Structures are given as structure tokens and as C-alpha cells.
Image (cartoon, rainbow, N blue to C red):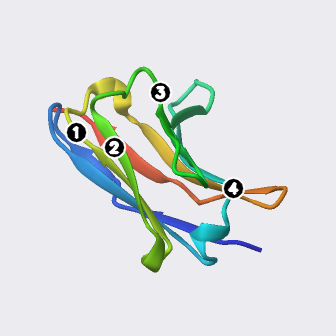
């Protein structure tokens, strides 16, 4: 059973920045894919950013150019740097990883963008 633990969420003003972290209990070099998702109240969970084992990265249209995903294999940690935050970025952000044929989720971290 792989465990994923997110951190770094909080309250930030519009235009501000936050960096989320996701620490995995297994080597992320073994993951087929890893990604960040978010879910706002009353909305479906959506993909924010994802990376494949080969390093191919993709972003959701609503965050492209503002969010950057990175990984530190030595620390088994994935990051999401979020800049130029907007109120519509408010959501619970989840870390996801696929190992073999199973998907694993973190517990989520709340990001609130408000003045």
C-alpha cells in the first residue's frame, strides 16, 4: 500500500504563490504516472498537472503558464509551484500516483485564494 502525504496548502491573496508537496512512501521512480488534481465545492475532480515515468509533463488549460510541477526522486517528493493564483483556483488539491495497476491518492490539502 503506497501512502501519499500532501502539504503546503493555505490561504493566499489573489496574485500570490504557494508550493504544494507530496511525499510518497515508495520510490517515485517506480510510478508509471504522477499528478496533481483538484476539486472545488460542487465540481468534479480535475487534472491540474501530470508527469509520466519518461518525464513527459502536461498541464490543465486553466493553470498552464502559472503552475509548474517538479519532482525530486531522491526525496520521493513531487511539487506543485502555483503562481499568480486566482480565486477560481480555490479547491482541495490531491496528489495521485499510479504504481503497477493501482492508483493511490493523498488525503488532500486545502488551497483558498481570497482577499
Tell me if label 1 and label 2 are in contact, CB under 8 Å.
Answer: yes
Precedes in sequence: disc 4 or disc 1? 4
* Secondary element at tag 4: loop
* Secondary element at tag 2: strand
Which callout, 2 or 4, points to the residue nearer the camera? 4
Residue 26 percent across, percent down from the top left: 64, 77
Tell me if label 1 and label 3 are in contact, CB under 8 Å.
Answer: no
* Secondary element at tag 1: loop
Precedes in sequence: disc 2 or disc 4? 4
Residue 86 in view here: yes
Residue 14 percent across, percent down from the top left: 17, 31
Residue identified by numbered label 3? 60
- Disc 3: CA contacts within 10 A as few (<14), some (14-19) or many (>=20): some
Which callout, 1 or 2, points to the residue nearer the camera? 2
Precedes in sequence: disc 1 or disc 2? 2
* Secondary element at tag 3: loop
Amino acid at each position: 500500500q503506497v501512502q501519499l502525504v500532501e502539504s503546503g496548502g493555505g490561504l493566499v491573496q489573489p496574485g500570490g504563490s504557494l508550493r504544494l508537496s507530496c511525499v510518497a512512501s515508495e520510490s517515485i521512480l517506480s510510478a508509471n504516472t504522477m499528478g496533481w488534481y483538484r476539486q472545488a465545492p460542487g465540481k468534479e475532480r480535475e487534472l491540474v498537472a501530470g508527469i509520466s515515468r519518461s518525464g513527459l509533463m502536461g498541464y490543465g488549460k486553466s493553470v498552464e503558464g502559472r503552475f509548474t510541477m517538479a519532482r525530486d526522486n531522491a526525496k520521493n517528493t513531487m511539487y506543485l509551484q502555483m503562481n499568480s493564483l486566482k480565486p477560481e483556483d480555490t479547491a482541495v488539491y490531491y496528489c495521485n500516483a499510479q504504481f503497477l495497476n493501482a492508483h493511490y491518492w493523498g488525503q488532500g490539502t486545502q488551497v483558498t485564494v481570497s482577499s
